[in-house]
């Protein structure tokens, strides 16, 4: 790589500024006109976030007067951290970690909607060594990302089992140990990893924790109490544009992933076919008769009850459906 | 580290000169050894001998690399950019601090607490704090800079202070003052040593940047690419990314080597030790005061950093100043007290850490003995050893758990891989510096090579073994943490991950501070043992 002196100074200069000051504004790519609005995703760019990519590509945020700063997540990124550090206005989070922080540490956060009506988190195994229900886990080795450990404990408890019945080991999102039989099952998005398993010539078997004692939302839309008060109009605009993006995406879930190959999905290390598989698989988990993002009172109650079983004393107060109601109106 | 191995090899040169034919035989044997190793790897990969095929063959890795190549340039650019910026910043600070320490002796004592902390702290413990505190590229740059600091700082001090006193006298004799000695002697003398330090620091910067990329969520960078690729269950891709990262490290290393060759020629850097030179000149009270300040300084820096971050808008919810953390540690508001949780995890981790230290040292010693008995074999194994140092362990986890399972064996295996290399380089250096006359003494009396090692090389290398143990101590803790995080799900490594996931920032800070503290204590304990051993055998400390 040859560097001209000027280019070199540009690179180092901007990096040093953003680095030394930790100054939020400098690192934000603000494209287009409109009110700056930052959202923090929960993972690296993949089909899980298709709706927001569609909305960006088709200019829905711009239509609503927002200049969206989309921030991808990653294993070390705690989306709530971006809210609490004032780096994002809205974040996609795991509901149990958000409400644990709210109830046990007083984090000033509130849930304003949910991307997944049913959390796609499930237990995935191979058809050659199938684990089709919680009871099948007895005596087996299950790989779980530390973040999801609570959810597994809840599922086991709801089925009269405990962590003594299963050997739980860390999971680092690499299915190789599962494919090689080193572990019997792993906890992952059932919308995603079965594709890879098929690609390796195996058949995948899976069940959702949602259907076995842990009926919770996932990728909940979370804001700080302060943002909810001070940026209501912007939040409404963001919700409207994002919902439009998801609706457009699900018109034909095979249509958009290939269009993002050189933009949102460029260099994410994954195959486009994998994204199409993901996008199709997640449609029934996201869509709702009450509209995308909606949170029915009965579903909130079930979510609260499930969280109560793992010691998170959440209540309906931690969910604010007023923005969604306004969206309908 | 590796340039020390270079010196170790140079030290053997007179021997080869004695037997001219061996000059060509040696490189030939090494090349053949590499080829044999590569062929063995290729066959093992193709035949799926290792871990049911989780070890890909070199040709498979290369093939995948070619298929994926269009993805790479952007990631390589991002990783090179952040590690380069971090490298420059870290070195700038390191050289300034080095100057300060060399020109004002008490500075060394006052900063020793900060220096030991920066040397000993496990980088994976620091990442979550950096990701919370900084935004965008900043965590990567910060970790690259922090990883760069220590070797450069040491090299600067070493280069500026270890000067031939006769040369200084000469300048003074001609009426030169402090400035003149600095200009004509110290700076010139410091340059080769500084460049040797930079060479060690350069790969550190790449690794630091990579490690922080795993988490920071930035769109480009090899660490990011690795995380995205994990879900494919494709070891060839992961190895390809690891090899490209290794190549970047090697590129950094070689550019500085070439720069050094062009600038200062082949002049050997100073090799003498850093420690223990300034004692005696200070009163007891002065020394105690220095000690107190040096212990307090890291805590004050932490406090200042938290204060500064709150000023630029980072939420106090995620930050903990030292007094806040102390209050939280002993707070009874939590269902289970922090001291208890962290203490329980440490009780799991520390015994493994001690075991890992011993096993890592033993492995390094074995390798050094093999290298002495058979220099060819030693050099054939060198690239393999280097590879284990720059391959991101997360890419190797499936392979490791498939071979070693998820219990003690994996902890020890990962800890050996994290610890042995610097220890090996130090020991090899020690063994290579054995005076030929002493060795010949055994040989003349009919002693075997093994006897020579037992009676001469091993006792001679005792100071180097101590120095190696000092290098290994904090790394062993890091190794056990990595194994717990990736494979076993126990101890401090797992706790850090769980705390992060459940947004328990009080716990995150408690674990980070505990990890740094334990690493520093391990380091200090080994230093004390070293003092005692060397005093007993009337030897001087190495490095």
Image (spheres, coloured by chain):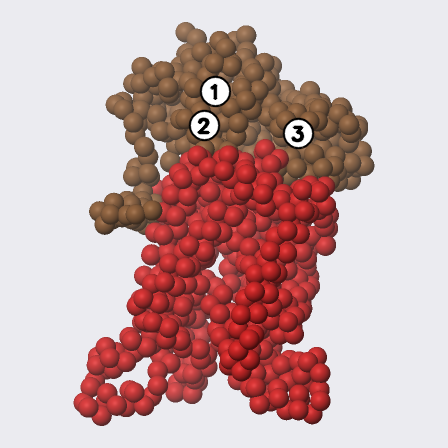
Chain colours: A brown, B red
Q: Are marks 1 and 3 in contact (CB under 8 Å)?
A: no
Labels 1 and 3 within one chain? yes
> Could one spot residue B291 in this view of the protein?
yes
Query: Looking at this rendering, what residue extends furthest in the front direction?
Result: B21
Splitting the image into 4 quarters, where does residue B523 fall?
A: bottom right
Residue at the disc numbered 3: A200
Q: Are marks 2 and 1 in contact (CB under 8 Å)?
A: yes
Disc 2/disc 3 C-alpha distance (Å): 22 Å
Q: Earlier in the sequence, mark 1 or mark 3?
A: 3
Q: Name the disc covering residue A257, or none.
A: 1
Task: Where is residue B148? Give x, y as percent.
Answer: 41, 59
SS category of the residue bearing label 1:
helix
Residue appearing at x 51%, y 59% in the figure: B121
Point out the frontmost of discs 2 and 3: 3
Residue appearing at x 44%, y 75% in the figure: B291
Residue at the disc numbered 2: A265
Badge 3 crowding class, 10 Å Cα cut-off, few under 14, some 14 to 19, many 20 or more, is some
Disc 1/disc 3 C-alpha distance (Å): 22 Å
Labels 2 and 1 within one chain? yes
Residue appearing at x 57%, y 90% in the figure: B437
Point out the frontmost of discs 1 and 3: 3
> Could one spot residue B288 in this view of the protein?
no
């Amino acid at each position: 790589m040859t560097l001209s002196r000027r280019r070199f100074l540009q690179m180092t200069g901007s990096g040093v500024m953003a680095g030394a000051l930790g100054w939020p504004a400098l690192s934000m790519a603000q494209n287009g006109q409109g009110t700056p609005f930052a959202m923090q995703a929960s993972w690296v760019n993949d089909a899980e976030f298709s709706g927001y990519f569609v909305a960006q590509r088709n200019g829905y945020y711009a239509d609503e007067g927002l200049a969206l700063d989309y921030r991808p997540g990653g294993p070390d990124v705690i989306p709530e951290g971006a809210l609490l550090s004032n780096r994002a206005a809205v974040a996609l989070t795991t509901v149990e970690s958000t409400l644990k922080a709210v109830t046990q540490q007083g984090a000033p956060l509130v849930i304003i909607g949910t991307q997944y009506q049913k959390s796609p988190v499930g237990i995935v195994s191979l058809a050659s060594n199938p684990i089709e229900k919680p009871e099948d886990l007895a005596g087996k080795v299950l790989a779980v990302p530390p973040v999801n450990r609570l959810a597994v404990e809840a599922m086991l408890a709801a089925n009269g089992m405990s962590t003594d019945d299963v050997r739980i080991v860390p999971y680092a999102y690499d299915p190789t140990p599962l494919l090689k039989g080193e572990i019997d099952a792993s906890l992952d998005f059932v919308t995603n990893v079965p594709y890879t398993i098929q690609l390796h010539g195996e058949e995948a078997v899976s069940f959702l924790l949602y259907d076995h004692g842990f009926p919770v939302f996932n990728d909940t839309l979370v804001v700080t109490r302060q943002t909810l008060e001070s940026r209501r109009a912007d939040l409404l605009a963001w919700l409207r544009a994002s919902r439009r993006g998801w609706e457009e995406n699900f018109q034909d879930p095979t249509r958009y992933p290939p269009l993002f190959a050189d933009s949102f999905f460029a260099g994410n290390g994954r195959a486009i076919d994998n994204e199409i598989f993901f996008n199709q698989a997640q449609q029934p988990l996201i869509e709702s008769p009450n509209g995308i993002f909606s949170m029915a009172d009965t579903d909130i109650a079930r979510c609260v009850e499930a969280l109560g079983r793992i010691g998170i004393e959440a209540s309906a107060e931690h969910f604010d459906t007023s923005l969604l109601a306004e969206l309908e109106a | 580290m590796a340039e020390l191995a270079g010196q170790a090899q140079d030290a053997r040169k007179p021997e080869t000169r004695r037997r001219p034919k061996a000059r060509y035989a040696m490189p030939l044997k090494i090349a053949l050894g590499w080829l044999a190793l590569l062929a063995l790897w290729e066959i093992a990969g193709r035949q799926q001998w290792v871990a049911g095929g989780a070890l890909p063959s070199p040709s498979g890795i290369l093939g995948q690399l070619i298929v994926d190549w269009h993805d790479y340039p952007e990631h390589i650019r991002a990783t090179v950019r952040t590690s380069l910026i971090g490298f420059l910043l870290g070195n700038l600070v390191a050289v300034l601090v080095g100057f300060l320490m060399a020109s004002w002796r008490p500075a060394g004592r006052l900063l020793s607490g900060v220096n030991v902390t920066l040397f000993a702290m496990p980088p994976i413990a620091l990442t979550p704090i950096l990701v919370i505190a900084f935004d965008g590229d900043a965590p990567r740059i910060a970790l690259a800079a922090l990883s760069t600091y220590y070797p450069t700082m040491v090299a600067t001090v070493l280069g500026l202070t270890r000067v031939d006193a006769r040369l200084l006298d000469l300048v003074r004799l001609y009426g030169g003052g402090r400035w003149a000695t600095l200009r004509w002697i110290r700076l010139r003398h410091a340059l080769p040593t500084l460049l040797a330090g930079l060479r060690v620091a350069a790969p550190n910067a790449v690794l630091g940047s990579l490690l922080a990329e795993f988490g920071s969520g930035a769109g480009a960078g090899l660490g990011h690419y690795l995380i995205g690729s994990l879900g494919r269950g494709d070891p060839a891709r992961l190895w390809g990314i690891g090899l490209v990262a290794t190549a970047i490290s090697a590129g950094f290393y070689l550019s500085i080597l070439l720069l050094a060759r062009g600038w200062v020629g082949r002049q050997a850097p100073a090799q003498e030790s850093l420690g223990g030179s300034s004692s005696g000149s200070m009163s007891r009270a002065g020394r105690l005061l220095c000690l107190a300040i040096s212990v307090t300084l890291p805590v004050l820096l932490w406090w200042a950093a938290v204060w500064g971050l709150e000023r630029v808008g980072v939420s106090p919810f995620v930050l903990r100043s030292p007094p806040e953390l102390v209050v939280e540690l002993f707070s009874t508001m939590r269902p289970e007290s922090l001291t208890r949780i962290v203490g329980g995890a440490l009780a799991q981790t520390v015994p493994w850490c001690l075991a890992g230290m011993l096993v890592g040292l033993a492995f390094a010693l074995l390798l050094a003995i093999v290298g002495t008995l058979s220099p060819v074999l030693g050099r054939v194994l060198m690239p393999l050893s280097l590879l284990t140092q720059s391959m991101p362990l997360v890419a190797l986890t499936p392979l490791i758990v498939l071979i070693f399972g998820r219990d003690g064996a994996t902890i020890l295996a990962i800890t050996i891989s994290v610890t042995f290399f610097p220890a090996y380089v130090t020991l090899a250096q020690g063994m290579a510096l054995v005076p030929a006359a002493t060795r010949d003494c055994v040989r003349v009396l009919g002693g075997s090579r093994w006897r020579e090692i037992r009676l001469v090389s091993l006792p001679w290398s005792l100071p180097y073994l101590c120095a190696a143990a000092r290098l290994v101590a904090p790394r062993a803790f890091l190794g056990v943490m990595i194994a717990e995080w990736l494979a076993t799900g126990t101890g401090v490594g797992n706790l850090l991950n769980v705390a992060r996931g459940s947004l328990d920032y009080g716990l995150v800070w408690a674990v980070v501070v505990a990890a740094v503290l334990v690493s520093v204590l391990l380091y200090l304990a080994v230093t004390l043992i070293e003092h005692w051993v060397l005093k007993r055998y009337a030897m001087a400390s190495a490095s």
